Image: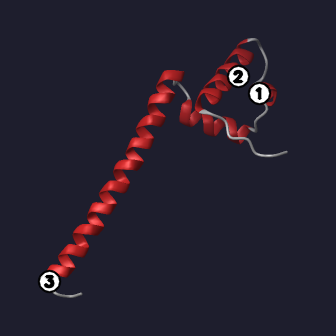
Amino acid sequence: MGKKRHTAEEIVAKLRQVDVLTAQGRTVADAIRQIGVTEVTYHRWRNEYGGLKSDQVKRLKELEMENARLRRAVSDLTLEKLILKEAASGNY
């Protein structure tokens, strides 16, 4: 069985599906099997996407991408600053 990457929207939909199945009287383990993931994956998803809605998940992913872009920019600028500082001191 190959790995499959689920989108954030799919994850939220599957978490809601488990909630519906448990409300109908199924056990959590049966509901998790029904959506086709392992218990470990389910609990990891629950911790990350627990109470979020689809629009909130999209915003979260956008913020994570922006955060990664800003981190790269800061690291590039820091590196340039260190190079300039070393060149100015004459240790090149």
Mark 1 and mark 3 residues within 8 Å of each other at the beta carbon: no
Q: Earlier in the sequence, mark 3 or mark 2?
A: 2
**In this view, 11 is above or below 76:** above
Q: Position of residue 58 (x, y in %)?
A: 49, 29
Q: Position of residue 83 (x, y in %)?
A: 25, 75
Can you identify the residue that label 3 sits on? 89
| Tag shown at residue 2 | none
Image quarter of residue 73: bottom left
Residue nearest the viewer, comparing 15 with 65: 65
State the residue at coordinates (26%, 68%).
80
Image quarter of residue 60: top left
Cα–Cα span, label 1 and label 3: 62 Å
Cα–Cα span, label 2 and label 1: 7 Å
Q: Position of residue 57 (x, y in %)?
A: 51, 29
> Quadrant where the N terminus lies?
top right
Can you identify the residue that label 2 sits on? 18
Q: Earlier in the sequence, mark 2 or mark 1?
A: 2
The nearer-to-camera label among 1 and 3 is: 3
The reply, left or right, for residue 54 in relation to residue 71 is: right
Check disc 3 and give the amino acid type: Ser
Cα–Cα span, label 3 and label 2: 62 Å
Q: Earlier in the sequence, mark 1 or mark 3?
A: 1
Can you identify the residue that label 1 sits on? 35
Can the viewer see residue 53? no
Check disc 2 and give the amino acid type: Val
